[in-house]
Amino acid sequence: MRDSPIASGVLLAAASAISFGVTTPLIARLGAQVGPLTIAALLYAGAALLSIVMRPFVARSGRALTRAALPRLFLIALFGAALAPTLLAWGLLRAGATSSSLVLNFEAVFTVLLARIVYGEHVGRRVAIAAFVMLVGGALVGLDAARAWQTVPIAGLAAVLAATASWAMDNTVTRGLAEEEPSDVVAAKGGLGAAVTACLALVLGEPAPTRWAVLGLLVCGATGYGLSLRLYLLAQRRIGAVRTSSVFATGPFVGAALAWMLGDRHAGPATALGAIAFGVGVYLHLTERHSHVHVHAPVEHEHMHRHDDGHHEHVHEPAFAGEHSHPHRHERTVHEHGHAPDIHHSHRH
């Protein structure tokens, strides 16, 4: 795992996807009589609570948040913790869990485009083909929705699609916080998002949820949003926004399968073909290999690192082994090896 940051990043992203995917059909059931803003507030309250409770038991794996991170935190709270889950909750109640789960794969497509535009992350032929295949898969899911117009309103799927665009913006902005302590980021994002949506729910007079709905949605938030976001941040740190979002696209398959087992039978032949298309897209991403001669310019920065990763050869007095964080300097280096767009490989192509 330490020798292959790509492999470790892929596994972290897959774990994040599963944590998120299993909660989608459960949220649809638990939130049947709950307003979308209330659902969003409870989900991110659960995420923040988990982060706060687990903080004494989890070793810190990033630098502390500073005032400079506040603009990014407000943006990810707005897009990822307020707007996106509200749209998802509204769409789930109208479109069903199976179709909605698969439409969530568009988050990967939008993230690929935004990460390319904002960070210049490498998008080669394989990644471009994968994004196109996933786009076709989403269109096939839409065909099933049109076929079942009476039971799966297009408006619901449109809301879920808008949620994926909002989460893609969240993913792109969050990339700049991947080196910060994940617990701090989750707590800040969850707390801000929960506060905003809870206030709006009260102002708009959404009905109060039952005790069981509150408990269930808090648990879904802790696992599908708190734990998932922590794993997602650690994955972004290793393999960047494009590849993390691509692996994360496996999560909706888990949600769709669970929804089907729970009795949601809206999916038809076109949805099955769409699922296959998404699977092909994810496979193309996961099997990508990227290696070429590249230059590391001199730089001073701080982040979690080890001294056996081929990029950190500075000396400590006394000697130190293991993962740690402190300000350090890199001299100019030219070499070739397999890599992903982590903090040391954000070069343009």
Image: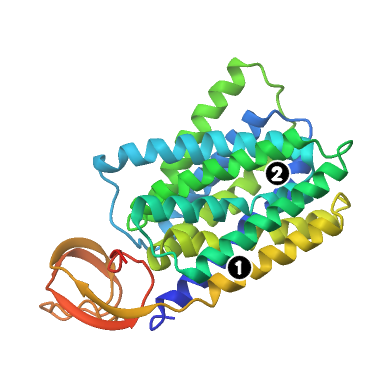
Percent coordinates x, y for residue 227 in the rendering: 54, 56
Q: Nearer the viewer, residue 74 or 221?
A: 74
In the drawing, what numbered circle is on residue 282?
A: 1
| Pointer 1 local density, CA inside 10 Å: few below 14, some 14–19, many at least 20 | many
Percent coordinates x, y for residue 55 in the rendering: 42, 54
| Residue occupying the point 50% across, 76% down | 288
Question: Gap between marks 1 and 2, in whole Å?
Answer: 31 Å
The three-letter code of the residue at mark 2 reads Gly
The correct choice, above or below, for 49 with respect to 333 in the image is above
In the drawing, what numbered circle is on residue 216?
A: 2
- Helix, strand or loop at label 2? It is helix
Q: Nearer the viewer, residue 220 or 283?
A: 283
The three-letter code of the residue at mark 1 reads Val
Q: Which quarter of the figure is the C terminus placed in?
A: bottom left
Q: Which quarter of the figure is the N terminus placed in?
A: bottom left
- Comparing labels 1 and 2, the label whose residue is closer to the camera: 1
Q: Quadrant of residue 42?
A: top right
One can see residue 188 in this view: yes
